[in-house]
Amino acid sequence: MPDKKVPVVKHGDVTQRVGVEVIKARGVDVDLLIKKLIANAAAEFASTYYYYTILRMHLAGHEDYKEICEDARLEDRAHWELIVPRIYELGGELPNDLPAFHDQAGCRAAKLPDPPTAVNILTLLLESERCAIRSWIEICDMTFGKDPRTYDMASRILNEEIEHEAWFIELLAHERDGKSIPSGHFRRGEPGEAPYSKNRGFYNP
Ligand SMILES: [Fe+2]
Ligand SMILES: [Fe+2]
């Protein structure tokens, strides 16, 4: 039985989307959701994927740290790829200007610290992952029980951000404090495997 609160989209009308109207009718503020998804996409692409590349380069002498930084870097790229199509489906679009896009990021750029010691880099990585967790749980809260498609994507990403935080707690505690705080991590099958967020698995489960 169709939901009576959903406005009728006329036959053949390409100016409206039933996929958007049904989530609005369930209480999603779609304009706000698009804005937050763009901010999160900018954080994945600019604040972390780009800057983690530089951070990884500077973890010289720590091949294990490099590899884990690389997993986090490639998985943030997977997060970007996963969520961008959803922005367009919802009727939004990416800014056609890279600096403007960068400036909308919901997390601070993970710029190379001075001095670029392993402790300083791991601290920055840890705090970047914490920002990502806060940003993605906000999307989960906005969409839970109302927009299953966005919720599913956001919760897949959140799974990996929580893993990333645990990895960097383990590495920073070891490097800075000489302490053992296990994350449960061994290694991905392939660098940046993204077990929860990979696009292929999502579209062809
Ligand atoms: Fe991410
Ligand atoms: Fe991450």
Image (cartoon, helix red, strand yellow):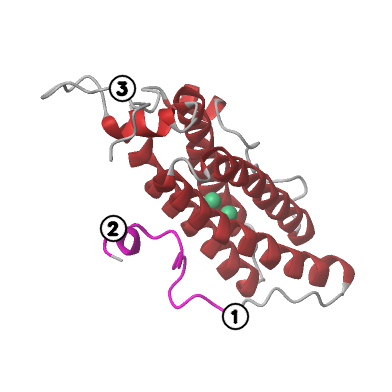
Q: Position of residue 80 (x, y in %)?
A: 43, 46
- Seen in the picture, residue 99 relative to 170 is either above or below; the reply is above
**Residue type beneath disc 3:** Pro
The residue under label 1 is: 186
Question: Which label is found at residue 203?
Answer: 2
Q: Choose between 16 and 52: the one closer to the eye.
A: 16
Q: Is residue 191 above or below residue 137?
A: below
- The response on whether ligand 2 sits within 8 Å of label 1 is no
10 Å crowding of disc 2: few (<14), some (14-19), many (20+)? few
Residue 147 visible, this orientation: yes
Quote the CA–CA distance across marks 3 and 2.
29 Å
User: Where, quadrant-wise, is the C terminus in this rendering?
Assistant: bottom left
**Magenta stretch containing residue 190, yes or no?**
yes
Q: Residue furthest left?
A: 12
Residue 174 vs residue 121: left or right?
A: right
Q: Which residues are magenta?
A: 186-204
Which comes before the other along the chain, label 3 or label 2?
Answer: 3
Q: Position of residue 141 (x, y in %)?
A: 59, 42
Mark 1: amino acid? Phe
Number of marks present in the image shown:
3
Camera sees residue 90: no
Q: Earlier in the sequence, mark 1 or mark 2?
A: 1
Q: Secondary structure at mark 2?
A: helix
Read off the residue under disc 3. 7
Kind of residue indicated by mark 2: Tyr
User: Magenta stretch: residue 189 in it?
Assistant: yes
Q: Main SS type for the magenta part?
A: loop
Dot 1 falls on a residue whose secondary structure is: loop
Q: Are marks 3 and 1 in contact (CB under 8 Å)?
A: no
- Displayed-image quarter of ligand 2: bottom right
Q: Residues within 10 Å of mark 3 (few under 14, many from 20)?
A: few
